[in-house]
Image (cartoon, coloured by chain):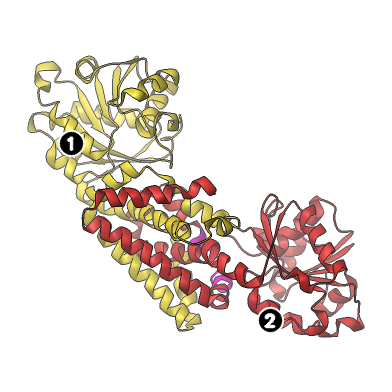
Chain colours: A yellow, B red
């Protein structure tokens, strides 16, 4: 099986590594828009060969779009002519939000196009961020699979199973709501926590005392501004709702501290503790 | 050298383990108020012997108060008669806030009493949370050392150096401000993030998608409600200020998302990224 990957950063590059690790593809081809990344990708040995997008789509059995959501929507337009090429081509996107992507898939490739979101990542980005165990043991959400034909659905399921992922099926709308709480809200908080310190008059003095809690909570504030601004706007409605709810919870805690409500503050903390009974 | 430790949870128990690991004490004695913990402490072998508080303070060279701030302030009153016992007794507290502690140290033990805050911890608590490498490589803040006599200052410095800690000296006021940003604010945020999910109608469905970012950011929401409500009230003024600043930063991010200000949102994220140049 030949696999083509568009975008070879954290997600695409790590997928290429996993495909190699488990000997899943006979050939891995890649395409990146940014010419400056090509040398690095080849030096890292992420793919067997870099091709043009035109060539790539005609030479593979599975085409992975491992690029930001906006770019996915733009590239899917170039796949409209798929029935002239290869109706067996399975297309899988790894975008962080799913509702808009699914709305915009051209009709003639709807059966081929599997919408996936692997719930995996690090704060690093670009080809050098690729690691060979990013996906193993993590969950991938596959959305609206009822709109795919069996051959394409099965190919996608098999691929994610082979790289060690747990599969969860969900409609795109629910995915985007859940992702806003589990991924987008934490990023918004982490960026804001980092800026609270950076806007202080002496960030270095504060940072000198940094411990595990702060380091953990500011880690994802290192994430790519280009990628995350795209995600925030794609999932704007859900993110704003999650932010409102978080603000309410934080304000509630603040009022309890302000008004010396010790028992109620302890109750609030114990409720928060209980998250870890289900996590 | 004989060391006595009051409180054998995460901080005190881990200190006992470090003292053993580096053969720093000839004997380690302990005292805990909660009788139910005694069996566990002896089974874990954290101390050589558990004594009454009266006996403990008369038999050791260094007395460590590894208990919440409120309890530290209460126990220090029982050490007023120290000059009848042993003027060479060094007392070190490990409380999370320092300003109020220092204000309340009885005059006749001021020279003996070293105010310390090891910037180390995990979300776990109680004797079973003790680990032997909690302190190694981390920073301890020692406050207002100019009020200690040389012998006590030197004993405290040596002890923390021997267990592998980096020493930072600071006045108590600055410590409490810095700690509010680096430790107390992150805890307030983590509790609130956990509750945002727990207050949702389907927390389990959301949690099913939990990834590294969310897990890291909710880890310290598991921290002890008793200890942290105490810390929040002790450092109320500084925490409320840090919370206000964080809320402003978060609101700013929210407005940029709401109003589609892409360039400004990217700038905000890039500023957050820059934290990691100094962390």
- Tell which subunit mark 2 falls on: B
Residue A34 is left or right of residue B109, and the answer is: left
- Please state the extent of the stretch shown in magenta in the rendering: B220-228
Callout 2 secondary element: helix
How many C-alpha atoms fall within 10 Å of the one at disc 2: few (<14), some, or many (≥20)? Answer: few
Please tell me whether residue A177 is drawn above or below residue B81 in the rendered image: above
Of A198 and A235, nearer the camera is A198
**Image-quadrant location for residue A188:** bottom left
Residue B26: percent from the left, percent from the top?
A: 90, 59
Residue B88 shows in the view = yes
What x and y, as percent, mark residue A42?
A: 40, 18
Q: Mark 1 points at which residue?
A: A73
* Numbered circle sitting on residue B103: 2
Label 1 residue SS: helix
Say which residue appears at 27% left-offset and 16% top-offset.
A51
Does A14 sit left or right of A146 as displayed?
A: right
């Amino acid at each position: 099986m030949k696999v083509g990957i568009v975008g070879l950063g954290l997600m695409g590059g790590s997928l290429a590594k996993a495909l190699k690790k488990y000997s899943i593809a006979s050939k891995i081809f890649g395409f990146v828009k940014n010419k400056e990344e090509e040398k690095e990708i080849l030096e890292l040995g992420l793919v067997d060969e870099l091709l043009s997008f035109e060539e790539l789509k005609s030479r593979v059995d599975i085409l992975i779009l491992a690029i930001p959501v906006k770019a996915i929507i733009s590239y899917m337009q170039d796949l409209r002519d798929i029935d002239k090429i290869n109706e067996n081509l399975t297309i899988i996107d790894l975008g962080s939000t799913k509702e808009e992507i699914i709305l915009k898939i051209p009709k003639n490739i709807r059966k081929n196009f599997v919408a996936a979101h692997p719930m995996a990542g690090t704060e690093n980005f670009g080809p050098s961020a690729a690691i060979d165990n990013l996906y193993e043991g993590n969950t991938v959400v596959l959305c609206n699979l009822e709109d795919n034909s069996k051959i394409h659905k099965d190919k996608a399921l098999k691929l994610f199973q082979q790289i060690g992922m747990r599969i969860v099926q969900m409609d795109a709308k629910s995915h985007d709501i859940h992702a806003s709480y589990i991924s987008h809200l934490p990023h918004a908080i982490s960026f804001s926590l980092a800026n609270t310190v950076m806007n202080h008059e002496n960030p270095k003095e504060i940072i000198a005392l940094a411990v595990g809690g702060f380091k953990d909570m500011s880690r994802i504030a290192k994430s790519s501004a280009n990628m995350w601004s795209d995600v925030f706007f794609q999932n704007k409605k859900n993110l704003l709702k999650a932010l409102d709810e978080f603000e309410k919870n934080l304000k509630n805690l603040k009022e309890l501290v302000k008004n010396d409500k010790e028992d109620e503050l302890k109750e609030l903390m114990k409720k928060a503790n209980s998250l870890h009974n289900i996590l």
